[in-house]
Image (spheres, grey):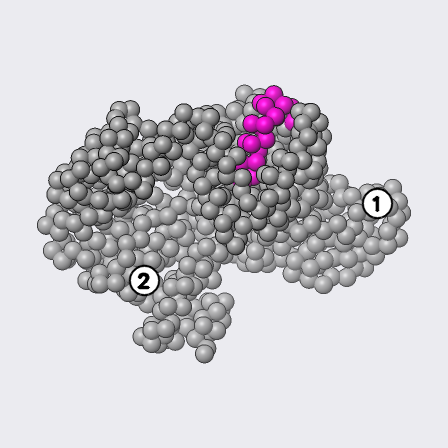
Amino acid sequence: MRVSLSLFIIIFSSFINAQDIDSVQYQGTNKEQPHVDFLESKVNIGVHAKSKSVKGKVVYTFKVVEASKSIFIDAQNMKIQSVSLDGNQIGFTYDTKKINVEFDFKANSTHRIRIDYKATPTKALYFVKDCQGNDQVWTQGQGKYTSNWLPSFDDMNEKVAFDLTIDFQKGYEVIANGKLINTESVNDSIVSWQYDMKHSMSSYLLAFAGGKYDKVVETSASGIPLEMYYYPNDKDKFETTYKHSKEIFDFLEQEIGFSYPWQNYKQVPVKDFLYAGMENTGTTIFSDAFVVDETSFVDQNYINVNAHELAHQWFGDLVTETEGTHHWLQEGFATYYALLAEKKIFGDDYFLYKLYESAEQLTELSKSKNATSLLDPKASSLTFYQRGAWAIHALRNLIGDANFKITIHNYLEKYKFRNATTDDFMTIASTVSGIDLSEFKKLWLENIKFPSQEALDILTKSEFIKNYLSLAQERTQPMAGKWNAMAKALEFPVNDYIGQEVIYQLEGNTSQETIALYDKAFKTNNIFVRQAIANTLSKIPLELQKQYESLLKDPSYATIEPALYHLWSSFPEKRKEYLDLTKDIIGFTNKNVRILWLVLVLNTSDYQTDMHQKFYFELSGYTSPKFGYSTRQNAFSYLESLQAFSDSTLVHLVDGATHHNWRFRNSCRKILDKLLKDEKYKKKYVVLLKSLPKGQQEFLEKKLTP
């Protein structure tokens, strides 16, 4: 099958944004019943993949702090079957959002309330099929509310010790918060999994995942079991996926200076996750896009997400913000400590460059209408994560390492298993250091403008940053005036970031003087310098053809993808050779290289033409729900450029447009909206409408109705 490249736009793979590691949406603070303190919870639920539903009961033990006539528990769109108080059935009202119970509650009395219920959640609990077609279920509480699948609390200030018992189909693993204390068969098809939590936590951190998994268990230096789960088919990717995991754990526990507070630590990859990862208490759930081979590790490893979610076990899980105003106490600290862990693994230059890079981004953000202070609950993820990390780094620089570590320890000790505010933290920092931090707070936390000069002053204590900035200052200079400095920067051993800066300044220029620099850059054999060449040098001069062709053998899928396209475009006479060389490369989990290869083959008129129909079916097949959303999104993007949608891909597009992952859903809706402006596709969808599931039918009918 031949598809036209006339509208073709190259779409290179994109990675999960660094600021989207976990949700930046937070629970709305609800302090409507401070007279009640919920202490413990016993949850017993059956999870049914076929009906995508939950049925069970929850028992809460609570203490009445002040006399009250009523209590409530959040529950979203459930069927509440019964409510009992201290073993006796009691009347209740339910408005699809809250269960209200009226009773003469006496001060200092303790009670138990039991709720039996059914739920078919549309968010917070997700039922999917993994890439092998097995059932998989997982939760996401932050920003989505656990009260969609369990009567609980949308207030992060309400902390409870949850014990979970989950019934799920036999032959599957169920992973949840706490320590697994028992599994037993309920019948021939159902197994019950019982988990125990020793300490209290906010409801949004309650989590479980069910699916086909194997695991490896290691033990931290302090004796904490580290359970690392993986799909049985991904056994050969386990080592690279979880590379440095124990090292990261041991480092963070020592660096933070406060013992890991939970019984164990589990990490579970899932399909089509909403974010890069989520720090559920003792149980991180993360996107299986980070389950990688050795080549993927270079550009798309799990290290940062791994360290970020682990740091949250202290900052967010042990001590939780009281409300969104203080969200930086969670995201800023998790980002900062993740950078420290990466510093240990990748070196000082990596750490400093990442700080420099985020300072540049924050400086630009300061100039925009979207700029906010760090204490604005509506601040951007860039602000919460990166500016938060910068504020912590600047504080450490101001009060010194010893005072900083004491501050962290005292903060965690004082507020453990509780909630805290910015003032709570700053008061401890000021007390420990003996420094009035009011000006620091104004500058780093309250000002809308990012303190760029102060950040630069901290950065330029480093010789590496001084050297980098010296070269960066040459960006506006003509080549003749900076050639020697650029050539020197490419001398062995070349620095990753300074070497890349040289390439970015060449800007694809192919004059004789720049060709000499490109030649020198190729010879550095620095993978990141060569990757920069692949991404920026699109029109390849003959003098560099041989060197550029060597990029196809680099151990980096982010290099091979643009290199293949640029070579294919620049040298038509060698297209078959390039395609032969890359025909067995799949690429990242989104199959970036393979999908590009298929598109290029379909537009190479004299290459395996008898296989073009098969190759098109493979390309269009990647839009199917059996694949992860990043693979599907990649395939949809190319098909849109090629205007080569078949009936099956049109159906898959509607499925994508109603998907639970909002990034993927939005990208599919944009493509769908464009297609529906074309009468040809609009007519096709009218015919296909009745073949769709009910929910998708209703969605498409609205799109088709003028």
Task: Please tell me whether the stretch drawn in magenta is mainly helix, strand or loop.
Answer: helix
Q: Give the range drawn in magenta.
A: 387-407
In this rendered view, identify the residue nearer to me: 270 or 212: 270
Going by the image, does 41 lie left or right of 129?
right
Q: Where is residue 287 in the image (x, y as percent from the top left)?
A: 46, 44
Q: Left or right of 477: which side holds 90?
A: right
Classify mark 1: helix, strand or loop: strand
Say what secondary structure mark 2 lies in: helix
Q: Using residue 477 as the reference point, say whether residue 334 is left or right of it.
A: right
Q: What residue type is labelled 2?
A: Glu
Decide: few, some or many residues near mark 1? Use Cα within 10 Å; few <14, some 14-19, many ≥20. Answer: many
Which quadrant holds the C terminus?
A: bottom left
Residue 48 location in percent, x, y? 56, 53
Image point 41% across, 61% down: which residue? 668
Choose mark 1 or mark 2, whichever is in front.
2
Q: Which residue reaches farthest bottom?
A: 706
Question: In percent of the image, x 80 and y 56: which residue is there?
Answer: 101
Indicate the quadrant containing the N terminus: top left, top right, bottom left or bottom right.
bottom left
- Residue 186 sits in which quadrant? top right
Give the image location of residue 518, x and y in percent.
21, 36
Query: Which of the 4 image quadrants contains residue 437?
Result: top right
Where does residue 446 sit, x and y in percent of width and height?
A: 62, 43
Residue topped by disc 2: 640
- Amino acid type at mark 1: Val
Q: Is residue 555 magenta?
A: no
Q: Earlier in the sequence, mark 1 or mark 2?
A: 1
Residue 391 colored in magenta in the image: yes
Which of the labelled discs sits on residue 242, or is there none?
A: none
Q: Decide: is 400 above or below 695.
A: above
Task: From the image, tell me which residue sits under label 1.
Answer: 64
Q: Residues within 10 Å of mark 2 (few under 14, many from 20)?
A: some
Question: Does the rendering let one see residue 393?
Answer: yes
